[in-house]
Amino acid sequence: VQLQASGGGLVQPGGSLGLSCSASGSFFGINTMGWYRQTPGKERELVAGSSSSGTANYAASVKGRFTISRDNAKNMVYLQMSGLKPEDTAVYYCYCNARSSRTAPWRTYWGRGTQVTVSS
């Protein structure tokens, strides 16, 4: 499974930015898709995740400002970020849990990160 993320960049505080991520390759199914982020010297933290049925969970720090959505037919996940703050600056990584067959174990796959910088 390969994950390709796009949409990062520089935005002013209070601004909005959208990220997208597509999954490709050979797999039987995808369960959860979502986003983590990481800043230098800190552990990677969950930003938002979405189950295949669309149930979403968010980090407390982004709840109400970020919205995750996905298109199962296209194997894509999106993250719409608004009300951005300097502390949202990080490298954002998309991930998915997928398996290669009905009986294979679920595995977590990661995309390359995309930089989001919130600064005036």
Image: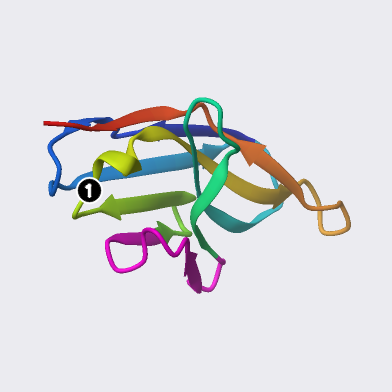
Quadrant in the picture for the N terminus: top right
> Is 74 placed left or right of 3 in the picture?
left
x and y percentages locating residue 27 in the rendered image = 69, 45
Q: Which residue is mark 1?
A: 84
Q: Amino acid at mark 1?
A: Leu
Could you tell me which residue is drawn at 55 percent across and 27 percent down?
A: 41
x and y percentages locating residue 92 in the rendered image = 44, 36
Could you tell me which residue is drawn at 47 percent across and 28 percent down?
A: 113
x and y percentages locating residue 19 in the rendered image = 32, 42
> Is 69 placed left or right of 86 in the picture?
right
> Is 44 placed left or right of 47 in the picture?
right
Please identify the dominant SS of the magenta region. Answer: loop
Magenta span has 59?
yes
Q: Nearer the viewer, residue 43 or 16?
A: 43
Q: Nearer the viewer, residue 92 or 29?
A: 92
Name the colouring of the figure. rainbow
Task: Determine whether the residue tagged by mark 1 lies in a helix, strand or loop.
Answer: loop
Instruction: Give, as a single range, the part of the protein colored magenta.
Output: 51-69
Q: Nearer the viewer, residue 108 or 88?
A: 88
Could you tell me which residue is drawn at 13 percent across and 46 percent down?
A: 15
